[in-house]
Image (cartoon, coloured by chain):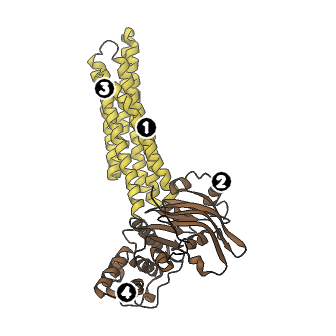
Chain colours: A brown, B yellow
Amino acid sequence: MEYKMQIKNLNLYYGKMQALYDVSMDVPTNSVVALIGPSGCGKSTFLKSLNRMNDLIDGVRIDGEIELDGANVYDANTDIVNLRKRLGMVFQRPNPFPMSIYDNVAYGCRVHGLNDKKKLDEIVERSLRGAAIWDEVKDRLNASAMGMSGGQQQRLCIARVMAVEPEVVLMDEPCSALDPISTMKIEELVSELKKDYTIVMVTHNMQQAARVSDYTAFFLNGKLIETDETNVIFTKPNNKKTEDYITGRFG
Amino acid sequence: MVDKTTRQEYIKNLAEVQAKVIEMGIAAREAVESAMKAFIQQNKTMAARVMQEDDRIDDMTIDIEDRCILLIAKQQPIAHDLRVIATGFKISTDLERIGDHAFDIAKTAYDISQNAPMKKLEFFYTSQLGDCAIEMLNMAIEAYEKEDITLAEKVCVKDDEMDELFAKTFFELSSLVTNEVARAQQITELLFIARFLERIGDHATNIAEWVIYLETAERIRKTKK
């Protein structure tokens, strides 16, 4: 199997408090990996360490390795802007910029120096189509993104990430602020996206992990308790704690 | 508005369960047909082949069950979707039993063919039962495939015909046993085949009842006369 990312013995500390303990995990290419576990288990911390978003927090210390295509993202010579382009991120609450739909999607490309109108038009259309929202917005690309519904805003944010052609998409509870139909649309989109991208998704919703992911990782108290194919985790998990959690015995 | 593209993978998986049930239905029907052919033609090779094929039908049950279990574990099926899964379990069990009965018929045909050839008349009633069972099975599978409740109801009606035919066959063959004591064992084997065919009719009726449940969520249970 081909792995897009390999995490080796990752420990993470917020000051004196240790948040992740010796986490090792592989992320297979073109798959969806779901991270599940109760609040405070470390799953979001783990996700944010993949594209070094934790660097922004004071007092964070990390040891271990996170390899992207075999290169450690924590190497001193890593270009962080480029890293975050390769690992795009979608957040819990849709966070469109207060500008037009078109400008939201084109934003990343412009930041990276692309100003050719024709090319930008192509990228905007391709990204919006890829995020399954083109048909809903094609006639109002110049309208403000702030007037869209939550579900549309979230798909716009996914289009914005796709516009800069990342390799991995990190999603931090992307549906927690959405209604059930919008949630289903995002889930459907995730299944489509994995053809071209590798996806790591934090979710509080175990059923969502079961529905959309190929692999599931269960975190508890900063430790990776178990990771396996989703088919296995949801039918015969190896660890009693995993079983207790997914069956709602605790958490 | 619900986007028609949502849950495509899940919808595909549900359709696969139904396709597998139909595939298994056809395999079970073919097994019964071949078993009856082997019996009527007293063809040992064909009988042996039906017996070997039974493993394949058993594997199909396991495959359908595994698919259903995964869908329950991962997709939270409800309403018609849930009934596709529930009936997937139940119908595959009925089909597996039909496969077992095809095996039993083939085995009996194999044993019978070791003895002196049978007289044509002795085949008469049993082969009529065979035709009836196969027709019921055909109708039940078609009703499932086309989600046709009317056809499913016809299977339930046909089961009465099957029961009458079985009663008649039982009477005729029992009389033969009294008249031809020397061939009592062979004729008793025929009685067994008749019973297996009657049971196949019952399983076909069960399938038809599951089709009705699948489409209407109504539980109907045919009471035996």
Question: Disc 1 sits on a residue from what chain?
Answer: B
Residue B46, x across and y down, in percent: 30, 26
Residue indicated by mark 2 = A240
The numbered mark at residue A102 is 4
Question: Disc 4 sits on a residue from what chain?
Answer: A
> On screen, A163 above or below B167?
below
Check chain identity for marks 4 and 3: say if they share one: no
Residue B115, x across and y down, in percent: 34, 13
Would you say B211 lies left or right of A38 here? left
Amino acid type at circle 1 is Asp
Check chain identity for marks 1 and 3: say if they share one: yes
Residue A177, x across and y down, in percent: 53, 77
Question: Dots 4 and 3: beta carbons under 8 Å?
Answer: no
State the CA–CA distance, disc 3 to disc 2: 51 Å
Amino acid type at circle 4 is Tyr
Q: How many marks?
A: 4
State the CA–CA distance, disc 2 to disc 4: 49 Å
Residue B219 visible in the snapshot: no
Near-viewer residue (A236 or A184): A236
Task: Give the label, 1 or 4, closer to the camera.
Answer: 4
